[in-house]
Amino acid sequence: MSPDPSQNPQASSSLRFGYGTNGLADLRLDDALALLADLGYDGVGLTLDHMHLDPLAPDLAARTRRVARRLDELGLGVTVETGARYVLDPRRKHGPSLLDPGPDDRARRVDLLLRAVRVAADLGAHAVHCFSGTVPDGTDEDTAWKRLAETLAPVLDAAAGAGVPLAVEPEPGHLLATLADFHHLRRTLGDPEPLGLTLDLGHCQCLEPLPPADCVREAAPWLRHVQIEDMRRGVHEHLPFGDGEIDFPPLLAALAATGYQGLTVVELPRHSHAGPHFAARSLPFLRRAAQRTAALPPHGDPSATPEGSTTP
C-alpha cells in the first residue's frame, strides 16, 4: 500500500505509536500484528487474553518465543497489558483483583502478573501494565491499600529481576484512580525502582484536576507506558479521535518534551468490532497532530487552549 505522508514515521515527533490488541479482539494475533505493521505502527500493546497469547494455556514460553520472532520480523515494539476482561474469571469482569478478600483469589491475579512479567522479558517489552481493581463491597479503603501494597510486592521483585518496569494505571472507579493515588502507592511502597506509571491520556481529560498536557509534565519522571484515545470531561468512555474534547497537538508536544521513549498505544477496546477500520484511521490522525506540534509555542500553553479537539 502507498503510505499517506501523515503516516511518515520520520515526522517531526519522536513519539512511537502503537495499537492495543484489545481493540482487535476479532483478529488472530498474527493477523493483528501484520495489520499494524502494514499500517505503519511502531508497535503493539499486547493484552494477554484467551485469543491473544493466552497466559494460562500450555507451552506459554514456546508460544511467546514464536510471537517474539514475529514481532522482530515485522519490526514492532511491544508492551504487555493485563487488562483482559475475563481471562481469569469467565463470569466476573476483571476478576479476581489484587484487592479481593480471599487470599487465593488475590494470588490468582498475582500469578497472572508474574506470568506477564516473564512474557514481557521474553518479548523484550518496554513495560508490563496493570491496575489496582475496584474496592470490593465491605472492604474499607485502608484495608484495600494494604492489600494492594502486599500483592504488588512479589510482582515488583519479579519485575526488578527481569529488568522490566511494572507500570500501574490509574483507572476511573478503581482504588488507584488518579495520579495522586499513584503517588500514594509509590510512597507507601518506598518508591521502588521497578514501579512506574501507565498514563492513559483520556483518563486525564476525564477526571484529573489538571489539563492533560499538565498531567503529562507532572507524571514525566514515572512514565513507563502511555495509552491514548479521545474522551470527554467526566465521562469514562474511550472514543475514536475527534469524537471527544481533547486538543491533541499540545498534549503530544508535552509528551514528546518529556523524552518518553516507550510506545503510545491507542486504546479502543469497545471498538473492536471495527478494529481494522479504527486502526487505519487512528495513526494518520496522530501523525498529523504530532506534526502540528511544531507550530506551538515552546512547551505549549495547554491551560490556555479551549476545550474541544481541533485536530482534523
Image: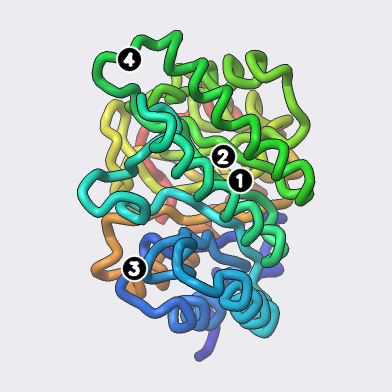
Q: Position of residue 287 (x, y in %)?
A: 55, 61
Residue wearing tag 3 = 25
Distance between the alpha carbons at the discs numbered 1 and 2: 5 Å
Q: Specify which label sits upstream in the sequence, 3 or 4.
A: 3
Give the number of the mark in front: 4 or 1: 4
Disc assigned to residue 198? 2
Side of 260 relative to 135 (left or right): right
C-beta proximity under 8 Å, tags 1 and 2: yes
- Picture residue at 56% right of the left edge, 39% below the top: 198
Q: Specify which label sits upstream in the sequence, 2 or 3.
A: 3
Instruction: Label 2, secondary structure: give it.
Output: strand
Give the number of the mark in front: 2 or 4: 4
Disc assigned to residue 139? 4
Where residue 232 sits, quadrant-wise, is top left
Q: Specify which label sits upstream in the sequence, 1 or 3.
A: 3
Q: Identify the residue at the far bottom of this view.
A: 1
Residue wearing tag 1 = 225
